[in-house]
Image: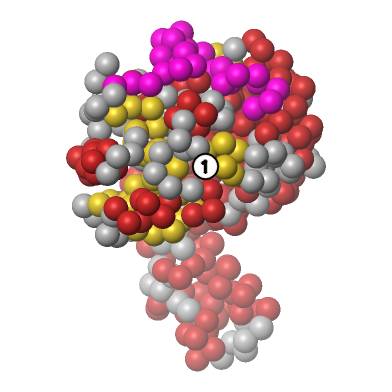
Amino acid sequence: MTIQVPDAAGKIIKQLNTHGFEAYAVGGCVRDSLLLRVPKDWDITTSAKPEQVKEIFARTVDTGILHGTVTVLMEHEAYEVTTYRIDGEYEDGRHPKSVEFTSNLLEDLKRRDFTINAMAYSERDGLVDAFGGVRDLEAGIIRCVGNPMDRFNEDALRILRAIRFSAQLGFEIEEETNKAISAIAPNMEKVSKERIAVELTKLLLSDYPEKMVAVFERGIAPYVSQHFNTAKRGLLQLEKLKMLPSSKHVRWSGLLRFLDPKEAAGILKELKLDNDTVDQVKILSELWKSEIPASKPEIRKVMSRINAPLFDDLLNFQTVFLNGSYLEQLKTVRQYAGEIVDNGDCICLKDMAVTGRDLIEAGVKPGPQMGEILEALFNQVLENPEYNSREYLLNYSKDLF
């Protein structure tokens, strides 16, 4: 079984071999190569100690030296090279208390999470598959290496990783691994919200986002965040999430669409997602149930509330989750929205021909009244784009103060 290793990674492996050390590509890059997918990263594992790796290569960075990882810079690329290791006791349910280096590749592989991630490869030695990774890849199975209770007790994040991999690959989780997920679910309280959010987002962005149901069925949801369990309302028509664009805020909106917008935003804040995502989810949660009339003035009003990409997301969202005669109406809304953009209609206050400074020069005092006048002028422009001229708007404003 041959895997095409990038030239730079192959050179690193060969140089380590030349100096008397074992070295292999390992983990996800091997898995993805066997699945005929393009790996994002190529990690290398070796019998060489970190200080020996640094002696062999001219350009290195100490990225995780305490855990045996040195980043080697080769041909404008960065490759993590990690010494074979045995993890000590996991006291916090996430990280080993200590790390012991070893010269035995199998000792290193057996500490890894799943069989499909516990394979190594080199051009010299071929594929090393001591735990049935190829078998499980061919069967479409996510299975822990060794005892699943031990693997999940070591690192509770692996619970979500199992579900996430099943979603990304379209695999099923093996029975004993599934039982262990339910048993160890309370340990998720030990995992940082940021790491949880990363796994859940990858799951939602996958080809099988409906596998999110396992987070609720396996009793994980109450430990994800204080209010995440309320998101199970979004499990209705969960398979439709894959019909949405694969973008973070859209898929999260799909899951949380039945919640109050503040409630949806609150869950994402508990998970420490970025403010842009939180804001966009809040807006989509608020607007998606409201049918947009097939009227250019009404469409401009909606477009004025959100940016152009988010308006497109809203239309896509409604196309997936609303039905009946409105779907035909949506085609007209989409057509009119395109014409509004092509015509350059003013749908943003900053593009209006009159500003607050113009009103001051016309005699309006700064304050609440000015805001009310600007809003009234903007509404005129949204109704009739041709009114967006300085002369017309200043004349119209005279009747307002």
From what the image shows, is residue 32 above or below residue 102? above
Q: Is residue 139 magenta?
A: yes
Q: How is the image coloured?
A: secondary structure
**Residue 126, image x, y percentages:** 29, 22
Quadrant assignment, res 345: bottom left
Residue 171 appears anywhere in the view:
no
Q: Quadrant of the N terminus?
A: top left
Q: Is residue 218 left or right of residue 164?
A: right
Residue at 33%, 21% (x, y): give it: 127
The magenta span reads: 126-151
Residue at 79%, 32% (x, y): give it: 186
| View extreme (front): residue | 20
Q: Which residue is mark 1?
A: 101
* Neighbourhood count class around disc 1 (C-alpha, 10 Å): few under 14, some 14–19, many 20 upward: some
Q: Is residue 248 left or right of residue 200?
A: left
**Residue 172, image x, y percentages:** 55, 14
Quadrant assignment, res 259: top right
Q: Is residue 130 left or right of residue 30?
A: right
From what the image shows, is residue 346 above or below residue 133? below
Amino acid type shown at disc 1: Phe
Please tell me which residue lies in front, 123 or 77.
123
**Residue 401, image x, y percentages:** 62, 82
Q: Is residue 197 magenta?
A: no
Please tell me which residue lies in front, 110 or 377.
110
From what the image shows, is residue 297 above or below residue 233? below
From what the image shows, is residue 291 above or below residue 213? below
